[in-house]
Image: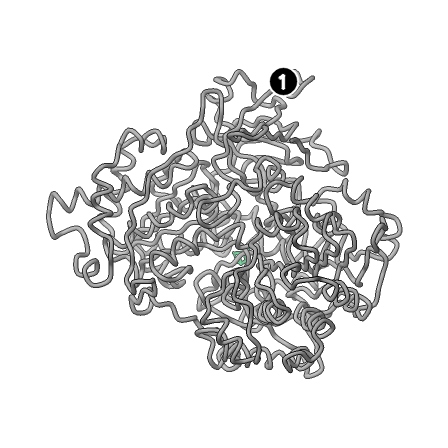
Amino acid sequence: MSAKAPREDYSDDAIEVGPPKSFAAGIGGVYHSMEPAIKQMGVARTARLMAKINHQDGFDCMSCAWPDPEHRKLAEFCENGGKAVTWEATPLTVERSFWLANPLSSLQDKSEYWLGQQGRLVEPVHKAPGADHYTPVTWEEAFAIVAARLGELDDPNEAAFYTSGRASNEAAFVFQLFARAWGTNNLPDCSNMCHESTGTAMTYSIGIGKSTVSYRDFGQADLIIVMGQNPGTNHPRMLTALQEAKENGAEIVAVNPLPEAGLIGYKDPQRVRGYLGRPTKIADQFIKIRSGGDMALLQAVSARVLAAEAAAPGTVLDHPFLERYCDGFPAFADHLAALDEHEVALATGVPAAEIDELADRYLRAERVIVCWAMGITQHRKGVDTIKEIINLLLLRGNIGRPGAGASPIRGHSNVQGDRTMGVWEQMPDSFLDALSAEFGFDPPRDHGVDAVRGIRALDEGRIKVWVGLGGNLLGAISDTALAESAMEKTRLSVQLSTKLNRSHVVTGEEALILPVLGRTEVDLQESGPQYVTVEDSVCAVHASHGQIPPVSDQVRSETAVVAGLAHATLGDRYGIDWPAMIRDYDVIRDHISRVVPGCADYNTKTRTRDGFVLPNGPRDERRFETETGRARLTANELEHVHCPPGRLLLQTVRSHDQFNTTIYSLNDRYRGIKKGRHVVFVHPDDITELGLVDGQQVDVFSEWPGQPDRVLRGLRVVAFPTARGCAATYFPEANVLVPLDSTALESNTPVSKAIVVRLSPSPGDSPA
Ligand code: SF4
């Protein structure tokens, strides 16, 4: 099986490769966010919007889910937040002439980058069965098509309702209500592909799948361990929090295969010395770990903690905490007593002295936070690795007190809120019971499909209607060829979107694009302007108010479109008053108050200046809602990926000019790449050992037991100081290398890290 990302619209011929940066942000960050903003939106619109990002009376940044500080500065955004706003609020629009000029067969050859550059979607369009063009339709016609196709299904489970992490809490709540009133729990979401491993592990170990720290805790920590995360690109304002933590005396340890700029240094663009002075050093210790070695590292650190306790009994572990709140310590300790240090060395590639140093830092610190992202979750053993993070924290009572805790960092602005609102294929019975009591129907109880199972069901013809509330599933999920052919088998695919992406051009037999408002835009309904709400990475919920007029009077809010689809499909079934929800979102928030745990008085609490923080058992009162009512230390079988000679362990990464599948430009400034994306980063010694040359073109073959190799062709080898034996290339292009069924154990998240690959010179390419 082979594939090459379509790229007829740009070439890498002029690619420039320079040295990687050793710090993030600074004046470059300001320039690179403001220059495109002013160019595309003009000075006045730029100034108006940038002054309102992440402010209490403004709108929530639609990019990542990093939380906001209590005391906000004039500019409360980063380079990537600025780019996300420009991308959404561009006045450029997709006009009718575009649809006439561009048949789907030609749009399918365009890259994500080109599609995203075409501007905002401004009217509903429909692709009839057999047609090669989208043509405009009215909203009423669009709603009627969806209602008709759903009505033709034999079983409600033949439909699926996918959610992206940008959808507001109001839209998400109405969407899951629509799906369940329709009769299915088929509610896959983008979280299935990123932090599902986090939810699975944390829920098992401590009874909640969310961060146990608040924003303030970062400033109170003694030690912050950042694992498998690249905050300089994916959560840039986190660097300000890390800088402040350091100023308060915290140490920071980064654990990552690549020495990313933002993990090394930071120049705060909000301070004078961010322009004139030297960068703040971020990581006091940088552990350049072999991809997939995190679980072994964590076990090795915990083993050292246990050894320190054995050497000085009663002085190292938090015995009162362990006795009062935790189960599983004896089995955990027994398991680690047999830890094989040789296997740790093989798995991590990290010298024992560096592990000793990390263990010493952990033992010195009174308050420890561990943060992580997809460098941890997207491994085959991602769930067990996160359980090891929790083990390490529990040993010294680092959960449920100031300055300490477990902090998964979410990538999309409301991905956590959507889950809180019920977008999950496995919502517990307690939530479904509350939904039933509120709306007078019995929601389905069988679990629905997640993203991977959803694609499989499409491929096998078991799902025939796919409705996507935002996002770009086909761009994001593994096994691109299979996912696309699966989508093409469906009868109807529907996308609610602001801009074009791959999921609009590879469609079902029949397709609809329904254009929606962005976060920056005023959402005016019958009762007046509406606000929506979101939840950040640390469980804080707040309002978001649109600021500028909508890009077109044809565009509707996500909430209005979802409720409109539901009304057209279900009418007044169960007496649910969908039009009332469109008229006034307070009606939705009143429902949320009565259905969603922790959201009582939702209208009142979201109208306060800073919103409110959701209850969190482990954080607030060391309450652990596991099956046993106690936190659980777990014994996890160590496993590491064996990499045969001549092979490398590949991980996918995002460029600095990218947000998820959205490509803002072809540059990756921090890694030294300009004007191209088809590169593979490899350690210089590995390049030599493999008989390759820096700058050479190679084909990357991924190897899977019992399956044919997969290939991504034509990547330029770039020498990069990554961990030995490892390589990295860009998502989403590299999704073709991962089979659909290669997923993390327990969480079913596609495995996009530690992929065994071989690099083979591209035919006809002579080494540079
Ligand atoms: S850190 Fe994240 S949420 Fe904050 S402005 Fe940057 S991209 Fe937006």
Image spot of residue 30 (x, y percent): 58, 51
Image quarter of the N terminus: top right
Residue 579 shows in this picture: yes
Image spot of residue 669 (x, y percent): 58, 40
The kind of secondary structure element at disc 1 is loop
- Report the side of 20 relative to 82 (left or right): left
**Residue nearest the observer in this picture, 230 or 476:** 476
* The CB of the residue at mark 1 lies under 8 Å from ligand 1: no
Residue on which disc 1 sits: 768
Image spot of residue 27 (x, y percent): 55, 48
The picture quadrant for ligand 1 comes to bottom right
The kind of residue tagged 1 is Ala
User: Farthest residue in the front direction?
Assistant: 154
**Residue nearest the observer in this picture, 579 or 715:** 579
Residue shown at 58%/52% (left/top)? 451
Residue shown at 34%/67% (left/top)? 617
Residue 278 shows in this picture: no
How is the rendered protein coloured?
one colour
Image spot of residue 335 (x, y percent): 24, 42
* The image quarter in which residue 573 lies: bottom right
* The image quarter in which residue 292 lies: top left
- Report the side of 640 relative to 391 (left or right): right
Residue 581 versus residue 23 in the image, above or below: below
* The image quarter in which residue 414 lies: bottom right
Residue shown at 66%/31% (left/top)? 2
